[in-house]
Image (tube, helix red, strand yellow):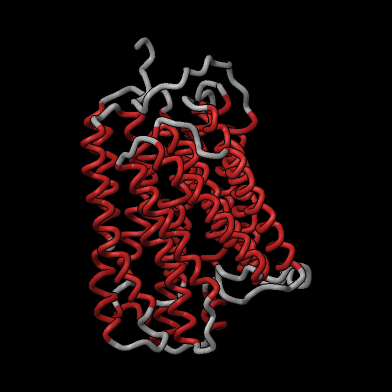
């Protein structure tokens, strides 16, 4: 750690990890409800637990991304964060809003729009927190050195925050409602978040491989260009069946096909940079998470997204367990694993300790990766059967669900492996203690020195 203000990232990462635990445990409960539908039906209905599960996912990922920004921007800009106090105020607003939203859900108060169920006051609090963040980070970057990483990161974060405005638009017309809803949900996860992910990945690889910055920046700009080119009009694959004009079936199909490209480039970028660097960085766990994130993002968001994005296929498959398979693997690979990568890299530096838990950390990596892959294959097979029985043969929904019971049991087992891996990750990062190290003095944004250099 080169700048004292980077310590604010530690608080963000700790809060993110806490919500990560809530999110995966909530997911495990939901998985069991699929096996035993009446479990907790009177105390915590399925839709309430699902809201907590999905909202915890979104918030902890955002906290991780904000923490990543507060960690890497000082190094890239070669100056301290503009205001540490504002960063902590922002964190308090986000955590109060999160607790308020959960409390509202538990007493039955919510907006009813998937992922955007938060009460109005919570939405306003999130908007204020986002504006504080943008001001704080922008002032830091403007006063310091500008790099491709900070440029892309700021672009993604500004667009991310501005798109939140559409969360306040809730027209009575259902088609318009869903259109504005997708402006937030799709353009977050398939456009602006991709920019943030790419910039964080570029920062990690720059630090851990020693490859020239020019090489990293060229790859970064190509990835960003393809992500925005495909992602914006790729929103059309959500417009097929919600009452919008029919031309969206072709626009969505064509540009959604292109959405595979940035994820393939991101995966290629990661492996090419590591190969070019040939550098034995001591934090091998962080490098493993970085490569794993880029790889699983390609398969989850790219390949599994393409499987049902063409409108001729989507007509039959939308809303089935195929969608769930794609959603779980893509979110996990693209954003969960990338957050865990930056946390794995930064926490030893923030805590002033060696990357001392690498064996446990890498064990958690493989547990979560294998569990998520197994869950994805299980849900994919279940979705194919569901599509054929329900959409082709015309069986009723609940009749089909009875036939998928075995798949839900297997999915629960895979989810349990993911939860064990997540708890092992938290233990390796937060609990186990290693030997203290002397932190380096503030320096320019250069790759980490090798032992003995």
In the image shown, does 73 or 139 lie closer to the viewer?
139
| Residue that lies at the very extreme toward the top in this rendered image | 452
Image coords of residue 72 (percent x, y): 43, 36
Foreground pick, 107 / 88: 88
Q: Is residue 138 above or below residue 38?
A: above
- Whether residue 420 is visible, yes or no, is no
Q: Nearer the viewer, residue 371 or 143?
A: 143
Give the percent coordinates (x, y) of residue 299. Answer: 34, 55
Q: Residue at x 41, y 52 (%)?
A: 334
Q: In which quadrant will I find the C terminus? A: top left
- Asked if 44 appears above or below 436 in the picture, the reply is below
Looking at the image, residue 69 lies above or below residue 327: above
Look at 31% across and 60% down and name the residue there: 303
Q: Residue at x 73, y 67 (%)?
A: 104
Q: Position of residue 364 (x, y in %)?
A: 52, 39
* Total numbered labels placed on residues in the image: 0
Q: Is residue 399 above or below residue 138?
A: below
**Residue 349, image x, y percentages:** 51, 26
- Answer with left or right where residue 446 lies relative to residue 373: left
Is 337 left or right of 170, judged from the image as shown?
A: left
Determine the residue positioned at 38% across, 48% down.
Answer: 153
- In this rendering, does residue 364 appear at all? yes
Q: Is residue 120 left or right of residue 167?
A: right
């Amino acid at each position: 750690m080169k700048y004292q203000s980077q310590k604010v990232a530690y608080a963000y990462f700790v809060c993110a990890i806490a919500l990560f635990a809530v999110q995966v445990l909530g997911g495990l409960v939901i998985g069991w409800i699929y096996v035993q539908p009446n479990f907790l039906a009177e105390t915590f209905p399925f839709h309430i637990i699902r809201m907590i599960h999905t909202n915890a996912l979104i918030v902890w990922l955002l906290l991780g991304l904000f923490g990543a920004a507060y960690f890497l921007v000082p190094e890239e800009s070669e100056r301290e964060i503009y205001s540490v106090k504002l960063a902590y105020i922002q964190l308090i607003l986000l955590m109060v809003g999160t607790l308020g939203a959960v409390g509202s859900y538990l007493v039955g108060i919510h907006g009813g729009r998937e992922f955007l169920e938060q009460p109005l006051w919570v939405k306003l609090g999130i908007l204020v927190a986002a504006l504080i963040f943008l001001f704080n980070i922008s002032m830091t970057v403007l006063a310091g050195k500008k790099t491709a990483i900070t440029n892309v990161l700021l672009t993604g974060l500004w667009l991310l925050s501005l798109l939140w405005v559409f969360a306040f638009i809730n027209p009575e017309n259902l088609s318009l409602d869903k259109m504005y809803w997708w402006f937030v949900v799709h353009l977050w996860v398939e456009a602006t978040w991709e920019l943030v992910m790419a910039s964080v990945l570029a920062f990690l690889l720059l630090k851990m491989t020693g490859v020239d910055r020019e090489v990293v920046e060229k790859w970064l700009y190509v990835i960003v260009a393809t992500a925005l080119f495909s992602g914006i009009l790729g929103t059309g694959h959500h417009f097929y069946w919600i009452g919008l004009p029919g031309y969206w079936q072709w626009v969505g199909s064509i540009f959604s096909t292109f959405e595979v490209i940035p994820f393939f480039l991101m995966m290629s970028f990661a492996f090419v940079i590591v190969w070019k660097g040939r550098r034995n960085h001591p934090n091998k766990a962080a490098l493993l998470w970085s490569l794993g994130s880029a790889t699983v993002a390609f398969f989850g968001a790219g390949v599994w997204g393409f499987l049902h994005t063409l409108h001729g296929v989507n007509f039959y498959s939308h809303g089935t367990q195929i969608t769930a398979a794609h959603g779980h693997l893509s979110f996990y690979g693209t954003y969960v694993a990338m957050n865990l990568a930056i946390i794995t890299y930064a926490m030893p530096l923030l805590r002033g300790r060696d990357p001392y838990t690498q064996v446990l950390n890498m064990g958690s990596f493989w547990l979560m990766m294998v569990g998520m892959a197994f869950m994805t294959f299980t849900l994919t097979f279940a979705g194919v059967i569901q599509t054929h029985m329900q959409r082709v043969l015309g069986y009723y929904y609940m009749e089909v669900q009875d036939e998928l019971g075995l798949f839900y049991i297997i999915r629960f087992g895979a989810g349990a492996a993911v939860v064990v891996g997540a708890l092992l990750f938290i233990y390796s990062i937060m609990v186990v203690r290693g030997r203290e190290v002397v932190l380096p003095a503030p320096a320019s944004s250069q790759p980490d020195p090798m032992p003995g250099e």
